[in-house]
């Protein structure tokens, strides 16, 4: 017969339970500590890359912004004003993304050093603190690393938030990251503003371009397009948010204020945010149904929808932002979010443009794709008119610190029609 096990008393059971719990917690703390140390060491290599290799851009005559009494930044020029849009940089900031992060920094620095824009606008997802790709939850490391690089370049820049910049599981909130970007003593070239506290989101603000007579020739509106909706807190169901009604009201009121300060003339404007408007899908659907030909509403400019099945990840909600743009004087809208999409269409008098992305991290194998990687150049004329065009990173004119990676320039877009 099997020998009966001696029964434990309730006290002995409690002691055993707490011993097991102690060793589990100890193991978790040890693993967490090791990961933190490795991440700290990992981020140091890219900080050293920025510190030792990124050089200040040499301008013949760099425009220096000033600030109005209403708190808005503005540039003064009677010449063309050059904007470079960068989007979806996706710096992981952890031990698993060191190489990819370096490639992203390398690409951005190479393009901006050549383009020498008057202003850079980053349309979201500077950070990608997704643990299985980055090995960290620390989104602050990514934001600081990118901001440090921009400060070393000495280029004035704006940024709006994307869905990945402050994930639900990230260590730092939008409020905390905003305080980093608004630190003028450390980042004097960053023109980010948290914006009004009584409306949704962080980073709703405007930067103006004026001529020497003080007239606003172009207003650049920045919006927080938020992250996820309908309890999709982790974003795994792709339920994306959009610009909220109170932000639209803020935009409309700000246009009125700028009009009043501009002698009654409504300034022309451009808008920048991360998640595309629902009208981008409407425009593309109409263009596709017409056999990829222009219609009364749609005019093709350039680019393609490279995401599988012509995917456009806009929100299912629509609060009327496009209509507000059309009713006022916003004629150009720039966003990111869908990394393989780089299409630009005129739709009902408003140009809708996906920026060329940087991303080396978010999609499996995307570091080896190349047709979508680059920047978008926006030239604003003294009369407020504008034009935009894409620039691919793998051109010879962009000389990077480290050797560029080998990519397939057609792989990601091979099955997409012009």
Image: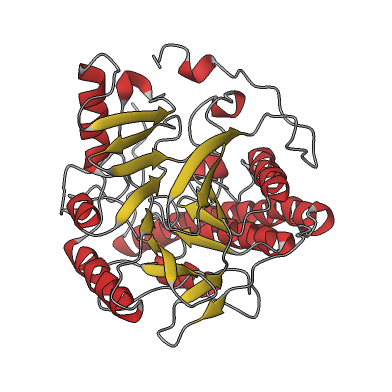
Vertical order, 224 against 5 (above or below)? below
Q: Residue furthest bottom?
A: 69
Q: Position of residue 104 (x, y in %)?
A: 64, 42
Q: Position of residue 371 (x, y in %)?
A: 55, 25
- Is residue 361 shown to the viewer in this render? no
**Which quarter of the figure has residue 409?**
top right
Q: Position of residue 215 (x, y in %)?
A: 44, 73
Q: Position of residue 22 (x, y in %)?
A: 48, 60
Instruction: Compare residues 122 and 90 and report the one nearer the observer.
Output: 122
Instruction: Compare residues 25 and 396 and report the one nearer the observer.
Output: 396
Total tally of numbered discs in the picture: 0
Residue at 56 percent across and 71 percent down: it is 76
Residue at 30 percent across and 61 percent down: it is 10
Vertical order, 395 against 106 (above or below)? above
Vertical order, 390 against 242 (above or below)? above
Q: Residue furthest right?
A: 52
Vertical order, 185 against 168 (above or below)? below
In the image, 368: left or right of 303?
Answer: right
**Which quarter of the figure has residue 277?**
top left
- Is residue 409 shown to the viewer in this render? yes
In the image, 368: left or right of 168?
Answer: right
Q: Quadrant of the N terminus?
A: top left
In the image, 95: left or right of 246?
Answer: right
């Amino acid at each position: 017969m099997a020998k009966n096990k001696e029964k434990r008393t309730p006290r002995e059971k409690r002691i055993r339970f707490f011993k097991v719990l102690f060793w589990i917690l100890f193991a978790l703390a040890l693993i967490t500590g090791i990961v933190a140390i490795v991440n700290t060491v990992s981020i140091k290599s890219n900080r050293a890359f920025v510190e030792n290799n990124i050089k200040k851009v040499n301008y013949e005559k760099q425009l220096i912004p000033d600030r109005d009494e209403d708190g808005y930044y503005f540039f003064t020029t009677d010449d063309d004003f050059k904007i470079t849009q960068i989007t979806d940089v996706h710096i992981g900031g952890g031990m698993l993304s060191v190489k990819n992060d370096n490639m992203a920094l390398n690409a951005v620095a190479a393009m901006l050093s050549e383009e020498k824009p008057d202003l850079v606008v980053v349309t979201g997802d500077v950070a990608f603190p997704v643990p299985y790709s980055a090995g960290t939850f620390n989104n602050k490391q990514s934001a600081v690393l990118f901001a440090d690089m921009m400060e070393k370049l000495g280029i004035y820049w704006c940024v709006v938030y994307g869905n990945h910049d402050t994930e639900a599981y990230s260590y730092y909130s939008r409020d905390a990251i905003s305080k980093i970007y608004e630190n003028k003593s450390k980042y004097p070239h960053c023109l980010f503003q948290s914006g009004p506290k009584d409306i949704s989101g962080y980073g709703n603000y405007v930067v103006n371009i004026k001529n020497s007579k003080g007239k606003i020739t172009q207003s650049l509106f920045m919006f927080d397009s938020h992250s996820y909706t309908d309890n999709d807190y982790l974003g795994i169901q792709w339920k994306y948010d959009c610009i909220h009604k109170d932000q639209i009201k803020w935009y409309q009121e700000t246009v009125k204020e700028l009009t009043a300060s501009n002698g009654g003339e409504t300034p022309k404007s451009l808008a920048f945010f991360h998640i595309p408007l629902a009208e981008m899908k409407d425009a593309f659907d109409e263009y596709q149904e017409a056999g990829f030909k222009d219609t009364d509403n749609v005019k093709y400019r350039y680019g393609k929808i490279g995401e599988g099945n012509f995917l456009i990840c806009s929100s299912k909600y629509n609060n009327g932002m496009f209509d507000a743009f059309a009713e006022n004087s916003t004629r150009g809208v720039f966003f990111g979010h869908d990394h393989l999409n780089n299409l630009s269409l005129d739709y009902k008098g408003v140009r809708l443009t996906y920026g060329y992305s940087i991303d080396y991290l978010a999609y499996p194998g995307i570091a080896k794709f190349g047709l979508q990687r680059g920047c978008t150049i926006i030239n604003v004329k003294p009369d407020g008119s504008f034009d935009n065009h894409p620039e691919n990173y793998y051109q010879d004119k962009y000389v990077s610190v480290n050797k560029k990676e080998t990519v397939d320039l057609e792989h990601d877009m091979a099955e997409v029609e012009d």
